[in-house]
Image (cartoon, rainbow, N blue to C red):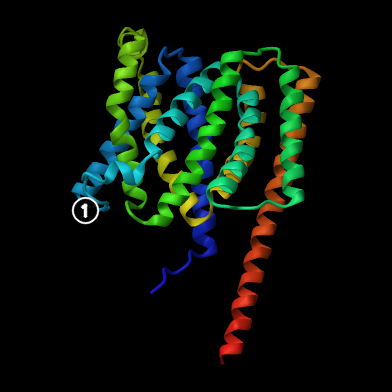
Amino acid sequence: MADKPPTLFVKLGAAGFYGVSSFFIVVVNKSVLTNYRFPSSICVGIGQMLATAAVLWVGKAARVISFPDLDDGTFLKIFPLPLLYVGNQITGLFGTKRLNLPMFTVLRRFSILFTMVAEGFLLKKKFSRPVQLTVFTMILGAFIAASADLSFDLQGYMFILLNDILTAANGAYVKQKLDAKELGKYGLLYYNALFMILPTLLLAHMTGDIEKATEYEGWSDVFFLSQFILSCVMGFILMYSTVLCTQYNSALTTTIVGCIKNVLVTYIGMVLSGDYIFSWTNFLGLNISIAGSLVYSYITLTEEQSSKGSENTKLDMKGKVVV
């Protein structure tokens, strides 16, 4: 018997959950890494991995959730998601630390372009001309904004563009692995984190990040500690909401929701982040990219609905022929 398709309410709920989670983790990570000047993005990532593995292990032990036990074939079933996950996480944290929020969010729109390429390659998906034109508008706006970014940081730009590529690949592979139904959404989350904890700890030791983190003077600050713990927990919640949104919708829908969330983050970041330097050219580029992203979201969602409508019509016609 085929699985019952998710209702519109479930789809919207999953998308909304991802949008809220994605918004709050950007704000919290920015506060921890920039406002409190915590010296190690890698250690924040390790905290998020540990929180993810711990919450899911407790959930399974309490029989609240279930996923397959570890065996010899588990790594091959999940590969290359652990590598994409840790790369996506670390590059995102580095980018958050080095860039102001408006430029961080506008450069994140490259992830839509890369998602289109990844879905075309992995899932053989094709995209209409209007979608291609709106993506071009977003990228054009990003280039205009970057040309007048008075707080330009080359390393930050490189980290966030790499993060866009990894986000796109991760979304497409998550959809592929979920469709295979070998590990389930909880298994993907748990083994993603579990397999990368030790390699990332080794990386942090080699780079001196563990020493920097242990010597950080802010551990006695209750406000910093609460935000650091919140960042770790939000890392798990974001992973869960990403998989949920991708499962009930698609990798592209997940990217669209992130894109709309970024509109809010962009304008809030201009006012509250403290590290945005205003210029008219930069502001114009940001708004061109935002306008493109909103039109893109509308076109993509309407095309998806019309496509499903035509599929249902075909099924009805087939049913009539059979009867």
Q: Position of residue 41 (x, y in %)?
A: 42, 19
Foreground pick, 303 / 241: 303
Nearer to us in this view, 123 or 307: 123
Rendered residue at 29%/31% (across/down): 50
Q: Is residue 263 above or below residue 69?
A: above
Give the residue at x 59% y 77%. 315
Image location of residue 316, percent across then percent down: 61, 81
Residue 76 at x, y percent in the picture: 32, 43
* Viewer-side residue, 170 vs 253: 170
Query: Is disc 1 surrounded by few (<14), some (14 to 19) or many (20+) residues within 10 Å?
Result: few
Instruction: Confirm whether residue 220 shows in the render.
Output: no
- Residue on which disc 1 sits: 63
Q: Element under label 1? A: loop
Q: Residue at x 67, y 23 (%)?
A: 270
Compared with 314, 293 (above or below) is above
Rendered position, 118 above or below 235: below
Q: Which residue shows up at 58% across the image and 20% down it?
A: 158
For the C terminus, the image quarter is bottom right
Q: Is residue 216 left or right of residue 6?
A: left
**In terms of depth relative to the viewer, which is nearer, 95 or 120?**
120
The N terminus lies in quadrant: bottom left
- Which amino acid type is marked by label 1? Arg
The quarter of the picture where residue 289 lies is: top right
Return the x and y of residue 320 as percentages of the image width and height: 61, 88
**Residue 34 visible in the shown view:** yes
Residue 286 found in image quarter: top right
287 on left or right of 238:
right
